[in-house]
Amino acid sequence: MTAEFDVNTPVLLRPRFQAFLRILAVVLIAGLLTRVWCLDQATTDRKSHEATVETDGTLVIDLNDATFQELMLMPGIGPKTARQILLDRRQHGPYDGIADLQRVAGVGPKTVQAIAPYCHATGRTPTQWVAEK
């Protein structure tokens, strides 16, 4: 028999095909492990955007992490105001407190007073804010 395969040898038993299958298996396993690792990193690194519920049943939203939909859960905050809050947060950085919402067009003292029980601000430093972007 020569170094070549016998014509009658089944394809699955040919050395070149077996080498190809080994390489394919290694690549697939490496891809799956990478995918699992990336998903794990994404879930542990990402800040949770879920609102917290206080012991008395009140929904409390962090103004510096809130999504568009979460902002609209608060009384007096509609789609336009929620967009304005997100835009202001992106342009000027995080809110140090709830009163900072008054820098958003359309949000005054009455709105701040109405949503105060439903939100808070983490008061992160600008360095932390930039590092997360």
Image (cartoon, helix red, strand yellow):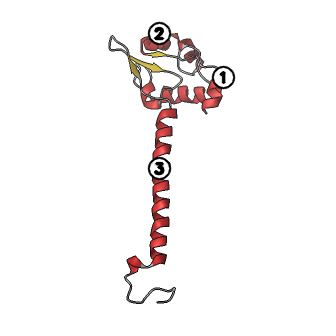
User: Residue 57, percent across and down?
Assistant: 32, 14
Q: Are marks 3 and 1 in contact (CB under 8 Å)?
A: no
Looking at the image, which residue is at 50% across and 60% down?
A: 27
Give coordinates of residue 99: x percent, y percent.
Answer: 55, 12
Mark sitting earlier along the chain (3/1):
3
Nearer the observer, disc 2 or disc 1? 1
Q: Is mark 2 on a helix, strand or loop?
A: helix
Residue 92: x percent and y percent?
A: 64, 25
Residue 130 occupies quadrant: top right
Q: Badge 3 is on which residue? A: 33
Q: Which of marks 3 and 2 is nearer the N terminus?
A: 3
Judged from the image, the secondary structure of the residue bearing numbered disc 3 is: helix
Please tell me how crowded label 1 is: few (under 14), some (14-19), or many (20+) other residues with Cα within 10 Å: few
Q: Name the residue under label 2.
A: 113
Along the viewing direction, whichever of 55 and 60 lies nearer the viewer:
55
Q: Residue at x 49, y 77 (%)?
A: 16
Dot 1 corresponds to which residue? 126
89 lies above or below 18: above
